[in-house]
Image (spheres, grey):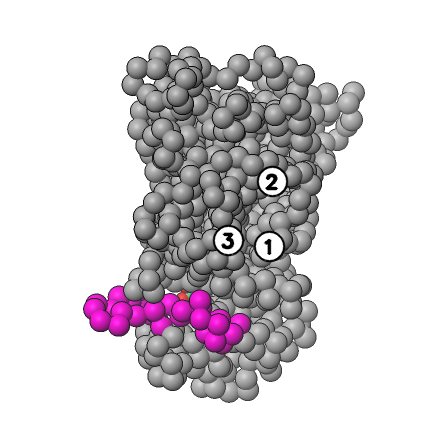
């Protein structure tokens, strides 16, 4: 709900309030953002005028207004606010354009509505600014998602005068008190995505981002700001994300006046975006939330927002068998049929043919761009194969990397200029391939038509869309190009989901390189990492869970020793970790014995019993795996009727001390049964949350007294939670 009175604007969600005020200078001051407050108290929220104005500057005649210390909702620099501005627009002669507040409009709908505008907002307000001569306008769009406790903001620049450049365009600016808070960022690389880092914020700027066209392996656009004492379960924290997939940046600037400025938006170190008369540039929406219920509170808000306003439809991810780790490029009609036949027996929902199915693609040096079946591997054609697979009652899935071209391909030979390559200097490849310049409409059309031809001519139910290299040799300014590229990619994806609304779309970019809200606007499943080892995955999936619900994280059971880490895991551990996610396998099921086959059949049927509610589950980090030998995750159905708790021990600890696991998010007076692996406890919610449950000693796979048990690396315990009684 948006409340307005006498220059005060308050954006309320169920649990939060953001209070702004248009002050006497036409600056919008951010007076407060946090737990919900009564709008009637607005006059009691005193603007910060406590700075002793010796070092800073102020408007003539008003020494109480030290601009550098005021919390603002928008800053374009040049008026004595020395912190980094949210937006920089320039005349071609290099003059900075100054903007002044000109009014607000309620209840607007963005004219550029696309899947990238999170749907279903409850209220909206646009705050207007204009340049002094009126030729350039800025709109700050706020959309309120009341039930999810999320506020989205985008910034739009419209030029009606002579040509200008946009040199910086943040989606979001939030100025709050600094108060020695901490930044929680999610950095990583291939095979170790979403690694949580905590940085103390003292004076200065901490800035993270990705400048390579891929949103998330090195730095996910989701981040948090927390009070130092905030834990998983209690304390104040803010969460931020960007509904975008491409180069991006966020910064947190802590001023000497106890101010903290948070900016988030498209990458701008080389942004030099030209706007002619009549043109506009729109930032993606950034989203923010606050919770005083700790890091789990922030995650819960973000998850709710993703379920209800980002992912295109409520969809249950089918249990798929993917051929990549099982066979790599060594696939054929015969092998896929054998796999499909066994997959049916083992109760999979479908099979995805990964890389290697198209024209002469026998390794990663060739053929990208030639999306035509390889007749040597598939003599009867893929349509025929797909029909036979579907006749068995299985879904048919196929891999594509449509934005790429190999030098050794027919496409490259016909259109060498479509590849992003240097015209004069050093050519840079990644995985032997080039990116296609989809900002050219004929290239975008080719890419779209290729995808459509694969989906329709093979009757694919499921498409794995991959992207396996970073940008280089781009046309013009790097960040401007990256923005144009993201817009072009949006165009292709929007057309695709409009044409195939039922298609399951899996997003992949060398593992989790595109785990972002931009891609989740089109698809609800992302390949979380190429690293499928459970020990690594426990960190990767836990890191991902801060910003994204477990149902979006594809997590597959795979071979042991693991192909990426060579680590040996028990199948039970691997399955327990993978099943807290969108489950499937990459295992070669043709090479496993009957016992393992039976294990997989049972694992599939067990997952199927959770699949429906897991798609919208509430997810909690019960014990923080980064600071403890134990990782404990709890997932609960949104109606609270059932759930699962997964306990993982990294190192075997012979004298573990019997730490009680205290569950969370239960109904205090309801009765629950916790069941599985020698555990059978019935107790009320309060008891399970306050006293917790002590685990059997031998769940680590070993007991000091029972010498008949062997020490194995079976370190998980997965227990079902069932609500068996109401509030008694
Ligand atoms: C990337 C993906 C893998 C697989 C291969 C195929 O590495 O992350 O899952 O699809 O490409 O080449």
* 588 lies above or below 640: below
Tag 1's secondary structure? loop
Judging depth in this view, the residue of 285 and 582 nearest the camera is: 285
Q: CA distance from mark 2 to mark 3?
A: 19 Å
Q: Quadrant of the N terminus?
A: top right
On screen, residue 117 above or below 100:
below
- Left or right of 207: which side holds 236? right
In the picture, which quadrant includes the C terminus? top right
Main secondary structure along the magenta-highlighted residues: loop
Cβ of mark 2 under 8 Å from ligand 1: the answer is no
Q: Earlier in the sequence, mark 2 or mark 3?
A: 2
Residue 192 pos. (x, y %): 37, 47
Image quarter of residue 22: top right
Q: Which residue is most to the left? A: 425
Please state which of the two labelled residues, at mark 2 or mark 1, is closer to the viewer: 2
Give me the disc on residue 160.
Answer: 3
Q: Where are the magenta residues, as a range?
A: 419-448
Q: Give the residue drawn at x 31%, y 24%.
A: 203
How far across and how far down the image is residue 649, in percent?
43, 35
Quadrant of the picture in which ligand 1 is shown:
bottom left
Vertical arrangement, residue 140 with respect to residue 516, above or below: above
Q: Position of residue 476 (x, y in %)?
A: 33, 62
Residue position for label 1: 112
Q: Foreground: 316 or 656? A: 316
Q: Report crowding for label 2: few under 14, some 14 to 19, many 20 or more residues within 10 A (C-alpha).
A: many
Q: Which mark is residue 126?
A: 2
Question: Is 69 one of the magenta-colored residues?
Answer: no
| Label whose residue precedes the other's in the sequence (2 or 1) | 1
Is residue 670 among the parts visible in the rendering? yes
């Amino acid at each position: 709900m948006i409340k307005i009175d006498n220059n005060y604007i308050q954006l309320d969600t169920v649990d939060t309030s953001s209070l702004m005020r248009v002050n006497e200078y036409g600056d919008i001051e951010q007076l407060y953002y946090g737990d919900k407050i009564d709008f009637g108290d607005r006059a009691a929220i005193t603007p910060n005028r406590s700075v002793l104005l010796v070092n800073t500057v102020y408007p003539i005649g008003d020494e109480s207004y030290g601009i550098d210390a005021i919390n603002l909702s928008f800053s374009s620099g040049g008026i004595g606010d020395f912190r980094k501005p949210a937006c920089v627009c320039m005349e071609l002669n290099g003059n900075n354009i100054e903007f002044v507040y000109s009014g607000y409009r309620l209840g607007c709908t963005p004219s550029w509505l696309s899947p990238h505008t999170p749907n279903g907002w409850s209220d909206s307000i646009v705050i207007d600014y204009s340049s002094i001569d009126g030729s350039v306008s800025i709109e700050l769009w706020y959309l309120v998602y009341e039930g999810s406790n999320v506020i989205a903001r985008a910034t739009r620049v419209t030029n009606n005068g002579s040509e200008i450049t946009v040199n910086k365009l943040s989606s979001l600016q939030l100025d709050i008190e600094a108060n020695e808070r901490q930044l929680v960022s999610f950095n990583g690389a291939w095979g170790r995505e979403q690694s949580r880092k905590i940085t103390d914020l003292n004076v200065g700027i901490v800035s993270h981002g990705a400048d390579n066209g891929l949103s998330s392996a090195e730095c996910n656009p989701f981040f948090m700001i927390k009070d130092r004492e905030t834990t998983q379960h209690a304390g104040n924290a803010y969460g931020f994300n960007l509904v975008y997939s491409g180069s991006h940046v966020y910064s947190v600037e802590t001023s000497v006046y106890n101010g903290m400025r948070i900016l988030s938006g498209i990458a701008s170190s080389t942004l030099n975006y030209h706007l002619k008369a009549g043109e506009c540039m729109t930032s993606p929406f950034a989203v923010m939330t606050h919770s005083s219920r700790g890091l789990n509170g922030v995650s819960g808000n973000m998850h709710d927002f993703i379920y209800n306003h980002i992912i295109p439809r409520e969809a249950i991810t089918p249990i798929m068998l993917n051929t990549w780790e099982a066979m790599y490029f060594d696939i054929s009609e015969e092998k896929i049929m054998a796999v499909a036949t066994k997959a049916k027996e083992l109760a999979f929902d479908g099979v995805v043919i990964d890389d290697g199915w198209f024209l002469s693609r026998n390794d990663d040096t060739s053929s990208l761009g030639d999306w035509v079946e390889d007749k040597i591997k598939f003599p009867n054609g893929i349509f025929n194969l797909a029909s036979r697979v579907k006749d068995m009652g299985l879904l048919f899935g196929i891999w594509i990397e449509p934005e790429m071209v190999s030098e050794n391909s027919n496409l490259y030979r016909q259109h060498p200029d479509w590849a992003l390559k240097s015209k004069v200097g050093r050519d840079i490849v990644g995985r032997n391939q080039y990116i296609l310049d989809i900002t050219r409409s004929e290239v975008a059309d080719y890419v779209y038509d290729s995808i459509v031809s694969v989906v329709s001519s093979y009757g694919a139910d499921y498409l794995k869309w991959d992207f396996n290299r970073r940008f280089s040799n781009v046309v013009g300014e790097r960040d401007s190009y990256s923005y144009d590229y993201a817009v072009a990619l949006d165009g292709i994806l929007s057309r695709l989901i409009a044409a195939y609304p039922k298609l399951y779309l899996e997003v992949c970019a060398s593992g989790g390189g595109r785990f972002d809200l931009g891609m989740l606007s089109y698809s609800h499943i992302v390949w979380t990492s190429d690293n499928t080892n459970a020990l690594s995955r426990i960190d990767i999936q836990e890191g991902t869970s801060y910003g994204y619900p477990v149902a979006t994280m594809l997590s597959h059971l795979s071979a042991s020793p693991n192909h990426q880490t060579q680590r040996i895991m028990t199948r039970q551990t691997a399955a327990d970790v993978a099943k807290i996610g969108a489950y499937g396998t990459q295992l070669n099921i043709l090479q496993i014995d009957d016992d393992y086959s039976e294990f997989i059949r049972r694992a599939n049927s067990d997952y199927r019993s959770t699949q429906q509610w897991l798609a919208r589950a509430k997810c909690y980090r019960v014990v923080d795996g980064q600071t403890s030998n134990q990782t404990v995750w709890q997932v609960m159905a949104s109606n609270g009727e059932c759930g699962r708790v997964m306990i993982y021990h990294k190192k075997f600890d012979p004298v573990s001390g019997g730490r009680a696991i205290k569950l969370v998010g239960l109904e205090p007076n309801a009765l629950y049964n916790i069941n599985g692996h020698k555990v059978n406890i019935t107790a009320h919610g309060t008891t399970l949350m306050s006293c917790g449950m002590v685990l059997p000693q031998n769940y680590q796979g070993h007991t000091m007294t029972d010498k008949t048990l062997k020490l194995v690396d079976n370190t998980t315990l997965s227990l079902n939670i069932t609500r068996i009684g109401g509030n008694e």
